Amino acid sequence: MALLARMVACPLAIEVRNGAVAALPGLLSDGRISAAGHVAVVVGPGLGEEVVAEVKPALENCVVHSVSGGSVATALGLVDELREGSHDAVVGIGGGRTLDVAKYAANQAGLPMVSVATNLAHDGIASPVASLEDDDGRKGSFGVHIPIAVVVDLDYVGRSPEEQLRSGIGDALSNLSALADWELAAEDRGEPIDGLAAAFARSGAESLLRGEDDLGSDAFHRTLAEALVLSGLAMAVAGSSRPCSGACHEISHAIDALYPKQASHGEQVAVGALFASFLREDGLFEPLGAALRGHGVARVPADLGLDDEQFGAAVAKAPSTRPDRYTILERLELAEDEIRDRVARYVDAVDR
């Protein structure tokens, strides 16, 4: 009998544990990524420099590149630097912006990329997507190769600010709303759902939805890290951000456009996901709201520094941010007065 299967792009190695950074040189050599450590290490401000100091004695042949911010211009500047040298791989060390710059530059330079995350603010640590800002500060998403290896050291994650953890929680939990929107697209437009991608996205999110570990514990950090990694794999399997991006991300993109740098990406998509769940009336609203409340993650516009009118304006603009995406917002096609009414009822329902 013939065996039919498909090839799924995923990292060669995923290390989520205490002390994972110290094992980075061995991972590079044993994984045949770079036997002699001829790698370009990309580091941003913050803990990244501390990580470099820890591993550099064992990576004598590495070249360190410092970057700041998460813009296309920064990434293109790094591409030029990479092309001037000879490297086996790019090792990005830091938070989301630094990793996205490293992913994009490595992709453009034709090099594999190792992702070393020092915080868990969003699901970019293992995704085939780089989110970068243009010269006007507007964010865009760029398809890149998935990291060849992912390293999350729980010792460093434990030192990150709680607001970064809450952002990561919001990003991971929003998958549940994105998947519900995908199911709407399948029902209304016949859009195919990739079951494997959906399983990856759902399992990571539900581990947080049902989990009871303390926000500051290694156990919780491991669960969150694995949920974010599974989000990245879900996008790689689907070939798009569809399993992790629905009305929640449309609303967040609209907030970014109308009120730049208002709040973290993860908390914006958390509020967007909860509002979308309220609109769908699909049973997700209560458990999702309880999980967000339990971890202190944003739930209403005021938590993002927005009033109801501003949030309503973002909801109205949201569908235009992803014209190809079908969600509850596209199904309902709410008029402005209807949006105001739904937002008011939503805020009242959350506050009860």
Image (spheres, rainbow, N blue to C red):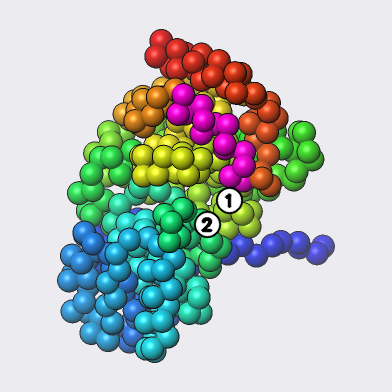
Quick one: 333 or 65, which is closer to the camera? Answer: 333
**Residue at far right of view:** 1
Q: Amino acid at mark 1?
A: Ser
Q: Position of residue 326 (x, y in %)?
A: 68, 39
Magenta highlight range? 309-322
Q: SS for tag 1?
A: loop
**Residue at far top of view:** 352
The quarter of the displayed image where residue 179 is located: top right
Measure the C-alpha gap from mark 2 to mark 1: 10 Å
The residue at 18%/70% (across/down) is 54
The residue at 37%/60% (across/down) is 70
Q: Is residue 315 magenta?
A: yes
Which residue in the structure is indicated by mark 2?
Answer: 141
The quarter of the displayed image where residue 201 is located: top right
Q: Position of residue 322 (x, y in %)?
A: 62, 46
- Whether 26 is drawn above or below 225: the answer is below
Q: Is residue 126 magenta?
A: no
- Is residue 269 shown left or right of residue 329? left
Which residue in the structure is indicated by mark 1?
Answer: 241
Q: Are marks 2 and 1 in contact (CB under 8 Å)?
A: yes
